[in-house]
Image (cartoon, rainbow, N blue to C red):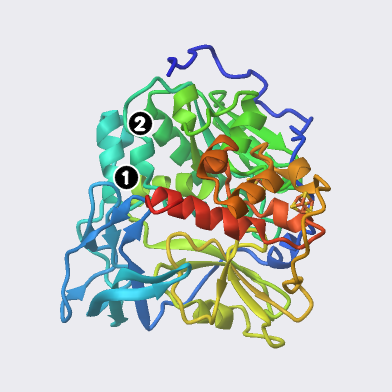
Amino acid sequence: MAEPSTAAPPAAWTYDPRPRRPDWGLYAPTLKLASMGHPIRQAPLPAEAVIPLGHARGSARPLVSPGDHVLTGQPVGSDAAAAVHASITGTVVAVEPRPVPGQAAMPCVVLRRTDPEHFWPDLAAADPARLAPEEIAAHIAAGGIVGLGGALFPTAVKLQPGRAIRALVINGAECEPWISCDEMLLRERAASVIRGTRIMMRALGTQRAVIAVEADMPEARVALADRLQAEADDHIGIAVVTAKYPAGGERQLIELLTGEQVPSGGLPRDIGYVCQNAGTAAAVADLFDTGRPLISRIVTVTGGAISAPGNFEARIGTPLADLVAAAGGYSVTAQRLLMGGPMMGIALADASLPVTRATNCLVAAAAGELAPPQPELPCIRCGECVQVCPARLLPNELLGALVRGDAAALAELGLADCIECGSCDYVCPSAIALTPRFAAARAAATSGTGR
Ligand code: SF4
Ligand code: SF4
C-alpha cells in the first residue's frame, strides 16, 4: 500500500458555513429534540452492576472473584488494549457470562453495591505533557477507554505509533436521528472534548485536528468555537456536515471532510487520518484530569413510551430499566425496545440488560412510532437502495449474489465495505430486509464460516 500523503489536510477547518453535503444517504425523521429539554442528568447508582469484560478486540481477564470487595474505579479486568474497572463500590457476586445487548452471553463481573461509595485510591491525574506518546496510549488502555460511538474499539490501539498522521478527526456528527448524547456532551462539555482531542493529538504526533458536527447542532458548534477562540487554538478546527444519515460513519465522515476515500478493506490511518468519537475525547480528558477510568457514559433515553426523555450519565452495568425509571418510567406501553437508534439499533426483549460501554441510546417506542416489519416482496430493481448507499455499493446486486450463494461475487461487489447502516432497508419499497442479510454474511465471512 502506498505511503500516505504528508500534504496538509484541507485548510477550511475553521468554521465553514457551507455544510459538506454527501450525494448518498437519506434524511430520516428526527426525534432528537425530545431528549434535549434537560441538561445531562446523573442516573442513580444501581443496586447491582453487570460489567462486561469484552470489547471489539477481545475480552479482559477477570482480576476478581466472588466475595471480593471492590472500590469504584478499581481494575476488575486486565487487558493490554482496554482494562475494565468497577463502576460502583460493592461486592463481587459473580464472574460469569451474562446476556448483554446484541449478545446472548459475554463474560461479566457482577457487583452488588455497598454504601457509602469509595473510590480506588490509586486513581490520580496525569500530565500528558510529561508523557511520551506511547505512554499516553498505555495510560488510555489502562483507563479502559474504548470508542464510545458504539464500536467498542480500544482507543489506545488507534493511537499506536505507525504511519504519520496528518490529522485527528473527532466525530461529533451524531447521525442516528433519535440519539442526542454526543450533541449534549458537546454543548455542555466542549472544554473536555477539546482537552481530550489535544491529548490524543500528542499521542499521534499530529498538529492538526478537526471536530465534526452536523448542521443542525448550532449550539454545539458555538460552544466549541467559543472555547477554541478563548484558548486561541488554531490547531483544532470545526467542520459542519449536513444532517444526513449516515454522515457520522467513520469512512463517510473522512471522505466528506477531506475528499479522500479510505481504501476498501483499509483503515483511515492508511490515508493519514485517525477518527475518534467526541465522547471518547471527553473520557480521555477525564482520565488525565482526574484519574477516573471509564466507569460511566452518557445514554440517551427516548421514544414515545418514555415519560420524560433525556440524557443520563450512567455507570457501566446499570440495568436499562433503571434509566427508564430515571426518565419517569413508561407513559404508555413500549411496543419496541432498541439499544441504539432506529436505523442501526439492536432489538431488546426487555430492559433488564445492562448499560455497556457501547450503549449510546435506549429507544422505547410507542405503538405506531416505528414501522412494523412488512412482508417482503420481490426486488423490482428500482435502484433506491443504490442511491442511498453511503459505501457506494449495489445492495440489490449483493442480494442477488447472496441468494445465489456466490461468495466471489459478494467479495467483488464489496460486501466487506458495507457499514450495516440500514439505509437500503429504509428506502426499499419491497420491504426487503437487506441489512440483516448483509450483516450475517459479513459475520460469517469474518468468522471463516462463510460461503
Ligand atoms: S430498493 Fe429494494 S426493490 Fe429497489 S432495487 Fe433495492 S432491493 Fe430492489
Ligand atoms: S447497509 Fe450496507 S449496503 Fe445497505 S446502504 Fe448501508 S452500507 Fe449500503
Label 2 residue SS: helix
User: What is the crowding at mark 1: few (fewer than 14 residues within 10 Å), some, or many (at least 20)?
Assistant: many
Label 1 residue SS: helix
Q: Nearer the viewer, residue 383 or 63?
A: 383
| Residue depicted at x 56% and y 35% | 412
The N terminus sits in image quarter: top left
* x then y, percent, for residue 140: 32, 45
Residue 182 visible from this viewpoint: no
Would the CB of label 2 be found within 8 Å of ligand 2? no
Relative side of 125 to 418, left or right: left
Residue with the mark numbered 2: 203
* x then y, percent, for residue 416: 52, 42
Q: Is residue 148 above or below residue 94?
A: above
| Residue depicted at x 58% and y 63% | 340
Q: Is residue 246 above or below residue 6?
A: below
Residue 53 visible from this viewpoint: yes
Q: Quadrant of residue 48?
A: bottom left
| Residue depicted at x 25% and y 55% | 123
Structural distance between the alpha carbons of marks 1 and 2:
10 Å
Q: Earlier in the sequence, mark 1 or mark 2?
A: 1
Numbered mark located on residue 140 in the image: 1
Q: Quadrant of residue 234?
A: top right
* x then y, percent, for residue 9: 57, 19
Q: Nearer the viewer, residue 351 or 434?
A: 434
Q: Quadrant of residue 117?
A: bottom left
